[in-house]
Image (cartoon, rainbow, N blue to C red):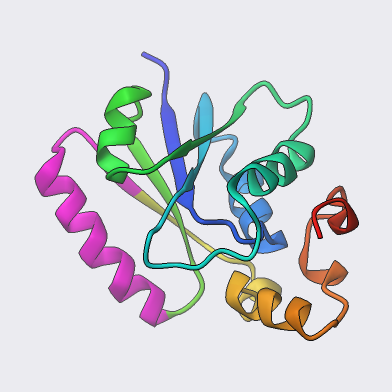
Amino acid sequence: MEKIAVFPGSFDPFTIGHESIVTRSLELFDKIVIAVGNNENKKCFFPLQARMAMIREVFAGNPKIEVSFYDDLTVAFCKRVNAKYILRGLRTSADFEYERAIAQVNKMMYNEVESVFILTLPEHTSINSSIVREVLKHGGDVSRFLPHSVDLKKYL
């Protein structure tokens, strides 16, 4: 059976931290579905199609990566794509506590799914999409926080 993982998030925008988690996880799974979620509690800076296009640019030509979107529960999406793993990155102990609670609820809702946590590289610990958006909103240069293949000018 193919080992499929879902890497869910809003990815607004997709950072070098996200890229690192996916790249470092490729050896663990046969396929990783990067699932761009539509979170009604978040006001997104980039439209859904732009976020998906950015991620596709980063992983162009990699047959193990698929980019999709969802607007329901992550476990419901996992069932639809036959994924038995949810991939998450952890930057801090606060991330762990938050993600642990979600993972436990996901497990109760869909017993077949396992959450897999990958620690961020130390140099990526301070990078998150919220900070990148703030820098962008104020005209700052965010190129060092985004994958090299992303041309942000196409999306602004």
Q: Is residue 52 left or right of residue 154?
A: left
* Of 119 and 53, the residue lying toward us: 53
Q: Quadrant of residue 132?
A: bottom right
Residue 112 is a magenta residue: yes
Q: Is residue 149 above or below residue 95?
A: above
Task: Say whether residue 45 is left or right of residue 31.
Answer: right
Left/right of residue 32 with respect to residue 124 in the rendered view: left
Pick the front one: 154 or 145: 154
Q: Residue at x 35, y 29 (%)?
A: 83
User: What is the magenta segment's predominant secondary structure?
Assistant: helix
Q: Quadrant of the C terminus?
A: bottom right
Q: Which residue is drawn at the image coordinates 15% and 55% (left, top)?
A: 105
Q: Is residue 69 above or below residue 123?
A: above
Residue interval drawn in magenta: 93-115
Q: Position of residue 21 (x, y in %)?
A: 59, 53
The reply, left or right, for residue 72 in relation to residue 137 is left
The N terminus lies in quadrant: top left
Residue at (68%, 82%) from the top-left corner?
134
> Residue 74 lies in magenta, yes or no?
no
Residue 61 at x, y percent in the picture:
78, 25
Residue 88 higher or lower than 107, as above or below: below
